[in-house]
Image (cartoon, rainbow, N blue to C red):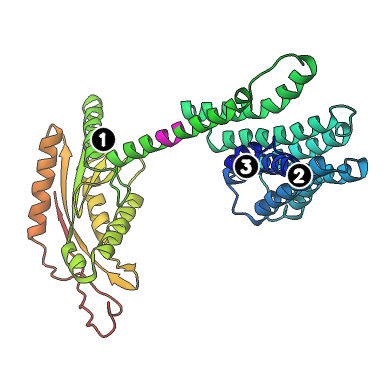
Amino acid sequence: MIMLHFGAYAFLPAPSPWCDIANYAGTAALAWAGMLFTWAAVPYRAQKSSRWIFLSLVAASAIYIGILVYGPVSFWTLAPAAALFGVLPLAISLFFLSQFHHPLRWTAVAIYVVLSIFLLVYQLREGNGAVLALNAVLFTVYLCCAIHFWHAYPRATVGAFITIAGFFAWASVFVIGPFTLVFFPNLHLDDEVWNLPKYVVAVGMILLLLEDQIEHNKYLALHDELTGLPNRRLFLDRLANTLERSRRSGTQAALLLIDLDEFKQVNDSVGHHIGDELLKRVGSVFLGRVRRSDTVARTGGDEFSVILEEPMSRADAVRVGHSLAQMLENPFEINGLSLQVGASVGIAIFPDDAGDVEALRIAADVRMYASKQESKAKNRINPQRPFHPGSAQPSGSRSGLQLAE
C-alpha cells in the first residue's frame, strides 16, 4: 500500500482527470496501509468482529476521501460519511460485545468516535476545512498504528522504541503539516522531510526482526529444538549453579540420568517422525512430574537428565526416579499407535557420591548403564493397528523399569 501511495503521487502533476485519480489512489492507499497494519497488529485479528471493523473503516475512508477528491463537498455528503468513522466500529463492537471485548478495541473505537466528532465540526470550515479533515483522518489512522504496535511490542529495545516513535512521528506529520501552513506559510520543507517517519518505521522494523532473530538464536543455543527442553549446554550450566548453591547452604542435590530402553526399535519399526513425537511426549511427562525449581533436560538422543534442587535427600531422589520410570508404563497414543518404552535410571547425590559436576555426571552415568544392562525387556512397542494396510502388527511387551542408585 505504501508503494502504491508513492507510485500514485508521482502522477499528481498529470492533467485532469489523471491527477484526481492519482490523488485519490495515493491518499486512500496511505490510509488503508495504516488500517491494514493496525488490524495485523491486534492480538485478536482472527475474530470475525475485527475483520468487520477493519472492512468498515476501509469502506468509510474510501467514501470520505472520494467525496473530498471528487465532490460535491457539502454538509449532506460529508456529514453522513464522517459519521461512518465512529458509528460503524461502535455498532459492530456493541453487536459482538457478548462474544468478544478487549480494552484495546474500545480505545480504537473511542479514537474513531472522536474523529467523527472532529470532522463534523471542522470539515466544512471555510478555507482549510477539507485539509484539516483529510489530515485528521490520516492522523487517527497512524495514531492507532502507534498505539496498537506499542501494545504488540511492550519491550524496552531499540527496535521497538524506534518503530513506536516513528509511528507517533508519522501521525504527528498530519498535525504539524497544517499547523505549518497556517502559522508559517513562507516556510518551505521538502517532501522528503514529511516522508522521513516512514523510513524511521522501516528501520525500526528491520531492527525488530534482527532482535527477534538474535533472541531465537539464543534460545536455540540453549534448548533442544525438538522438545524445547534445556540442552546439554544449559543443563551443565544449571547443574553447576545447583551444586554451588548446595555447597554454600550445606544441603544435598540429586542428578538423575534417564535412558529410554529399546527406543531404537521405535525408530526402526514406525519411523523417526513417530520417535520424535514420542520424545516430545516423554519430555512433557517428565516436566510435569518435577517441581518448577527442578530442571528436565534432553542431553542425548534418547537420554534425559533431571536436576533435583534442594531440599533433596537420597530417598526423595529414589522416589522421583521410580515415579518417572513408572510413568512410562502407560502407553503413548501417537498417530493411532500405542507405543510403550521403558527407562533405565541412574541416580547420583551431591555431595555424597561426588563433589563436582563432572564426577557427579560420571557417577550417575555409570549407574544408569549398569541398570540398563539388567533390563530384561526386548520389545516395548504395542501398536493398536497396522502401520500400513496389510502389514503385520509388532507384538507388545511390558515396560522396563530399571533403577540404580
Q: Residue at x 23, y 67 (%)?
A: 271
Position of 404 with respect to 310 (left or right) is: left
Q: Which amino acid does label 1 sit on?
A: Arg
Q: Where is residue 360 in the image (x, y as percent from the top left)?
A: 13, 38
Rendered position, 309 above or below 288: above
Mark whose residue sits in front, 2 or 3: 2
Q: How far apart are marks 1 and 3 (CA)?
A: 47 Å
Q: What residue type is labelled 3?
A: Ala
Q: Position of residue 94 (x, y in %)?
A: 77, 51
Q: Position of residue 137 (x, y in %)?
A: 74, 36
Q: Can you tell which quarter of the image residue 252 is in?
A: top left
- What residue range appears in magenta? 207-211
Position of 193 with respect to 128 (left or right) is: left
Residue that carries the numbered disc 2 in the rendered image: 17
Q: Residue at x 44, y 31 (%)?
A: 207
The dominant secondary structure in magenta is: helix
Q: Can you tell which quarter of the image residue 8 is in?
A: top right
Residue that carries the numbered disc 1 in the rendered image: 238
Q: Position of residue 321 (x, y in %)?
A: 23, 52
Position of 280 with respect to 86 (left or right) is: left
Q: What residue type is labelled 2?
A: Pro
Residue that carries the numbered disc 3 in the rendered image: 33
- Kindly identify which numbered label has been placed on residue 84: none
Sequence-wise, the earlier of marks 2 and 3 is 2
Q: Nearer the viewer, residue 327 or 389?
A: 389
